[in-house]
């Protein structure tokens, strides 16, 4: 049992503020729950935070020193047990960069364990307490088609450690797919995922590996047939429209859809084109006469 806050921080009654801060930093390295992987140090770390909060502030420090029963702060403070499920902050602004240095510090510790053949034990303990974090990344449909490598800047952890992580987006990836990032030599206590968001496209609607689009043609072209240039995900191609094409007819262009994820043979889905017909408006007298003639000829057509 610790007698009082001075005893808890391991400093004497005449310790300076500098001594108190140095002791606090040393104890953070030893007992912060995000760094200590072998035991639950939350209660002790909360008590250390409380001790530092009192002893580092002049007014609270003075009141505490004059209290003849100050050891009761340690023995009877039951409030600490109510905060086990909250994030644990660092108290002072000049400690804001502490955890960023601890990542490197903890990484060195892990490497030491690995050199002594204890890597499996360490990784097993990490997996028991590991959390996950998700970060959205928007890409275009073309980037999904071709695949792309991007850099994702994220602010990670309690103190916003800046990480620039490389994200490889494979060909054919779908909207909402999660990618587990490789943090390389940076050891973090959680799995970092990118959630891919594919932006809407002005021409195509995606359905799995297939693409869908609508094509409008004039009435005369639908009757007589024509050849038109239409967009695909890889560029424009010519599409033959046969005579008598009706609204709602769907043309299929095989292999003009999205690549199949993980397929090394570069197989792809299809592009489906739905036809709609533009009917003329504000016809001239001559155009109306021609349509009436066409109608008359159809009605009087023989066998």
Image (cartoon, rainbow, N blue to C red):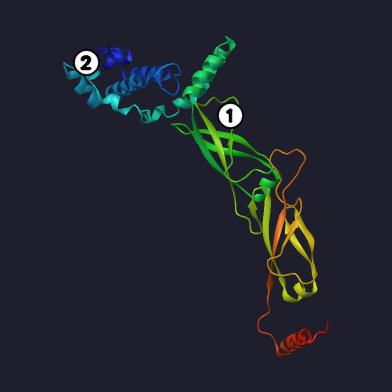
In which quarter of the view is residue 48 placed?
A: top left
Q: What residue did someone put label 1 on?
A: 183
Q: Secondary structure at mark 1?
A: loop
Res. 194 mark:
none
Q: Nearer the viewer, residue 129 or 102?
A: 129
At a point 22% along the width and 27% down the height, the residue shown is 59
In which quarter of the view is residue 178 placed?
A: top right
In the rendered image, the vertical position of residue 18 relative to residue 176, given as above or below: above
In the rendered image, the vertical position of residue 247 relative to residue 30, given as above or below: below
In the rendered image, the vertical position of residue 199 relative to residue 302, given as above or below: above
Q: Nearer the viewer, residue 145 or 73?
A: 145
In which quarter of the view is residue 45 placed?
A: top left
Whichever of callouts 2 and 1 sits on the residue coming sooner in the sequence is: 2
Q: Is residue 238 left or right of residue 107?
A: right
At a point 59% along the width and 46% down the height, the residue shown is 175
At a point 38% along the width and 17% down the height, the residue shown is 27
Q: What residue did someone put label 2 on?
A: 71
Q: Quadrant of the C terminus?
A: bottom right
Which residue is outermost to the right? 303
């Amino acid at each position: 049992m610790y007698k009082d806050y001075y005893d808890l921080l391991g400093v004497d009654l005449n310790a300076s503020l500098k001594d108190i801060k140095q002791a606090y930093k040393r104890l953070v390295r030893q007992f912060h729950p995000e760094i200590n992987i072998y035991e639950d140090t939350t209660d002790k770390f909360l008590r250390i935070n409380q001790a530092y909060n009192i002893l580092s502030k002049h007014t609270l420090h003075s009141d505490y020193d004059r209290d003849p029963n100050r050891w009761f702060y340690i023995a009877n403070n039951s409030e600490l047990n109510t905060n086990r499920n909250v994030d644990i902050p660092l108290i002072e602004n000049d400690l804001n960069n502490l955890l960023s240095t601890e990542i490197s510090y903890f990484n060195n510790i892990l490497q030491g364990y690995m050199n002594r053949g204890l890597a499996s034990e360490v990784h097993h303990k990490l997996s028991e307490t590991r959390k996950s974090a998700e970060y959205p990344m928007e890409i275009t449909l073309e980037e999904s088609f071709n695949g792309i490598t991007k850099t994702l800047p994220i602010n990670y952890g309690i103190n916003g450690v800046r990480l620039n992580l490389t994200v490889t987006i494979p060909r054919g990836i779908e909207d909402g797919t999660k990618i587990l990032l490789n943090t390389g030599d940076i050891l973090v206590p959680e799995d970092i995922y990118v959630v891919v968001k594919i932006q809407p496209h002005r021409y195509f609607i995606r359905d799995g590996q297939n693409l869908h689009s609508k094509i409008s043609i004039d009435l005369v072209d639908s009757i007589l047939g024509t050849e038109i240039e239409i967009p695909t995900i890889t560029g424009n191609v010519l599409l033959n429209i046969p005579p008598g094409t009706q609204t709602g007819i769907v043309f299929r262009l095989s292999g003009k859809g999205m690549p199949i994820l993980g397929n090394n043979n570069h197989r792809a889905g299809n592009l489906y084109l739905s036809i709609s017909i533009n009917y003329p408006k504000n016809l001239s007298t001559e155009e109306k006469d021609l349509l009436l003639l066409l109608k008359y000829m159809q009605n009087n057509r023989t066998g």
